[in-house]
Image: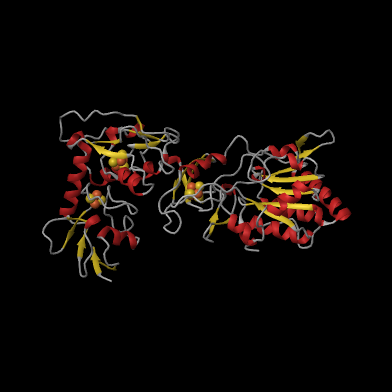
Amino acid sequence: MPNITVDGQELEVEKGRTILQALDDAGLLMNGVDVPHYCWHPKLPIDGSCRLCQVEVEGIPKLQIACNTPVQDGMVVHTTTDRVRAAREGVMELLLVNHPLDCPICDQAGECKLQDYAFEYGISASRTREPRRALKKSVDLGPTILFDQERCILCRRCVRFCREIPGTGELGVFNRGDHSVIETFPGTELDNPYSMNVADICPVGALTTKDFRFKIRVWFLEDVPGVCTGCSNGCNVYLGVANNKVYRYVPRRNDQVNDTWLCDAGRMSYKKIGAEDRLRGPLVRDDDGVLRDATLESAVAVAAERLRRLVDAKGAGVVAVVASAHATDQDLAMLRRLVDAVGIDTVGVALIVGEGDALLIKPEKAANAAGARARGFGDLGPVLERLRGGGVEALLCLGHDLLHESLLGGAGPLEGLDSVVVLDTHRSELERVADVVLPARHAAEKHGTLTNHAGLAQHVQPAVEPAFQAWSEGELLARLGAALELDGFDGSFDPLAEGDA
Ligand code: SF4
Ligand code: SF4
Ligand code: FES
């Protein structure tokens, strides 16, 4: 392992790494050792084109670009000398010659590397008198991304991303010199399952997502760490929150899980949190057969009374339980306790399985299938068989994935049941057959863990507080267990203490 010294600090680094990679590996890059950079990105091939990362290396007369200079044992690097600073100022002046300076209307303002480095290394007045380049301000690159040609600094991160990560290669640099522009190849558009990542990696406001454009100034957003619930990969995200509303997901780097990427479908799944079709309070079916608003206490009491009556009369064998792979490990642990306390055998997890790929997207379209399986909620086949074939008279159902065409295919087979109790985040056809509906919290609204496909339990925490009535499934089940007068249930649920079951 070579040893190098950066600004007087000794580092043991991995052989074959560049200076910038070595700093990134040590967690020092822009976190103690500031080497500004545009074209370099930790998860993309090296380009070496922007020249902003120049540093002084003892024994080498010319400044070296840190992103493409391999470390050597005994290397002594300086990142804060006058020569280095002058080089950075020169690069910044060049980049700003043609930049439109439309920060007041740019979505990137507040998280823009051109702003940040101009503040740090820019000069306060321009030495040019020539007019700036006038280019197209809003090029539609495809379904998700708009491109402002004037703001582009030609770092080519977006080009390398499309070529190397999804492997679709839709973007290229066309023309030469100061006529160079980023464009899609003729007859193509930027349209791949990971297209929106180009907006994250564009260091300036040249590439913006249509979804987030002009929604809010980013300095009003609080970045709350969370986990995408779109599939069992469990990609790490920051939820951008303001005014108790989630405005976006952006990737949170985790080299074990998602590097620095998100798929577009998962990224857009933030919309489910504040969706119009969220369940907004408990519902109980009245004597006229109409679902009506109810208090939590009365709804839980009705659910418990219906289940207790059936179990007392016919035994726990007539009750089926469908777990949700969207619930947290702690919610599922509480469900397991309730199922065992009543003695219910007909249990399984409703899980939608779709397409996956070799990058991030997993076939299981829920975040906690592994957590459900670990708590004994396995294949739904036997539950479906009994629901279709008879023998079940009551159903306790978490979520509505059960209705998916690959599982029950709709609520029809549930019509003849004596009692259906539903715990769910969103409205669904289950309301047609439900006797009691209890509104549940989304993973962005509660504490807990979600276990991804690789068995990694990842924490979630409340990023927003629902503006309506909703409880975690664990709390609803704890109250139901208490109303059923089950041993060990006192109605309380602590997601931080519940742990594994
Ligand atoms: S659009 Fe952004 S990421 Fe692409 S080359 Fe220009 S500045 Fe770089
Ligand atoms: S790959 Fe899965 S977990 Fe990752 S962003 Fe997409 S849907 Fe979410
Ligand atoms: S970051 Fe090194 S040349 Fe661009």
Q: Give the number of marks.
A: 0
401 or 153, which lies in front?
401
286 or 262, which lies in front?
262
Q: Quadrant of residue 436?
A: top right
Q: Is residue 474 visible?
A: no
Q: Residue at x 66, y 44 (%)?
A: 400
The outermost residue toward the right is: 313
Instruction: Please provide percent x and percent y for residue 324.
Output: 64, 51
Q: Quadrant of residue 194?
A: top left
Would residue 179 be found to the left or right of residue 138 on screen?
A: left
311 or 249, which lies in front?
311
Q: Is residue 239 visible?
A: yes
Instruction: Please provide percent x and percent y for residue 278.
Output: 63, 38
Q: Quadrant of residue 34?
A: bottom left
Q: Residue at x 12, y 64 (%)?
A: 59
Instruction: Please provide percent x and percent y for residue 138.
Output: 34, 29
Instruction: Please provide percent x and percent y for residue 422.
Output: 72, 45
265 or 72, which lies in front?
265
* 32 lies above or below 87: below
Would residue 294 be found to the left or right of residue 49 on screen?
A: right
The outermost residue toward the left is: 61
